[in-house]
Amino acid sequence: MDVDLRDLELLEALEQYGTLTAAAEHLFVSQPALSQRLVRLEKCLGTKLFDRVGRGLVVNPAGKRMLQAARVTLHELRDAMRDVRELQLDQREMIRFWSECLTNYDWLPDVVDRFRRQYPAASVIVQPDQNISHVEALLEHRIDVALITQLDHKTDSVRLERVFDDELVAVVGVEHPWARRPYAEAKDFSDIHLMLFDSFDPDRDQPIPLPIPDGAEPGRLSMLSVFDDDLIDTITNTDAVAVMPSWIATPYLTAGGVRAVQIGRDSHIRTWYCATRHGSMPKHLEVFIDLLGHALDGDSRGVNRG
């Protein structure tokens, strides 16, 4: 095919400016050269693309079809060129972030804001897909940092930096049979309606173990994509049990209507880590991880930090 990028730019300019003279000025070429290019293009296609009306050019049906293709092609090409330039400028300060827990994104805007104050040209991209292997994603350079709790043999391939500890608790209504208990054991979970956030979805390719004692078999399991006041209303008015971090539960415990029950004889404590690739760490990534640590500080989150 003999149609090239300059032909598409010619079509775009002629539609926008209406005359060869104006289009030539826009494209910084001479009017005769542009006229010759239009003649060659129409000869190549075997049809006229514009009808002459006075001194102007009016696009005809064949020209409209070519213009449609020109718009799509030029738009996509310009977007790609812009993306490549931005990658060249900002790739050293770009952070692609993934978190094991969907419920902790409430603090992320403040972390990003503080980070951007130090690196105004930087960008933070949140990887929303929970159904990925964070280790593989790190090693394949699809993400730069992952906030995780679950460790396995694969995590030996990445660097781990401890960030904070938190406790998972069972939250129930004040009239629930568990409300007066110091803790709930595995047998207590039999036949209950257990409500969890979807980060614990057992159907995932890389499932995260349910945050309940070994051997516990709840009668019904509901996975929730978001945490909101409707969940608290459900807990308050039914026998459902929700498992969540204590720092999320604390404001609702203070307001009344629900109570927190320890999971197991020993507290269900999780340790959170920032996982990154081995090797030298860019300064901007060090800063971002440090900001995460401050945002998730135990004093402000109601969690245990050692």
Image: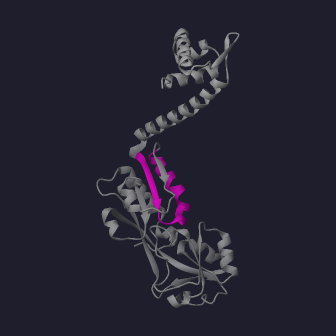
Q: Is residue 270 visible?
A: yes
What quarter of the picture does the C terminus occupy?
Answer: bottom left
Q: Nearer the viewer, residue 111 or 20?
A: 20
Q: Position of residue 250 (x, y in %)?
A: 58, 74
For residue 68, side relative to residue 2 (left or right): right
> What percent of the width, then of the height, locates residue 178?
60, 88
The residue furthest left is: 279
In magenta segment, residue 113: yes
Q: Is residue 247 above or below residue 191?
A: above
Image position of 46 with respect to 233: above or below? above
- Name the residue nearer the viewer: 276 or 114: 276
Is there any visible trace of residue 185 in the rendered image? Answer: no
Give whichever of 291, 269 is nearer the camera. 269
Image check: 27 left or right of 48?
left
Where does the image place residue 211, in percent across and percent down from the top left?
Answer: 49, 78
Which one is nearer the viewer's eye here, 220 or 46? 46
Residue at 55% over, 89% down: 188
> Is residue 131 in the magenta section?
no
- In the image, is 25 to the left or to the right of 115? right
> What residue do we see at 51% from left, 36% from top?
79
Query: What percent of the width, then of the height, locates residue 78?
Result: 51, 33
Up-down relation of residue 279 to residue 188 (above or below): above
Highlighted magenta segment, given as a residue range:
93-119
- The residue shown at (40%, 44%) is 91
Count numbered badges in the picture: 0
Q: How is the image coloured?
A: one colour
Q: Main secondary structure of the magenta part?
A: helix
**Identity of the residue furthest to the front in this view:** 46
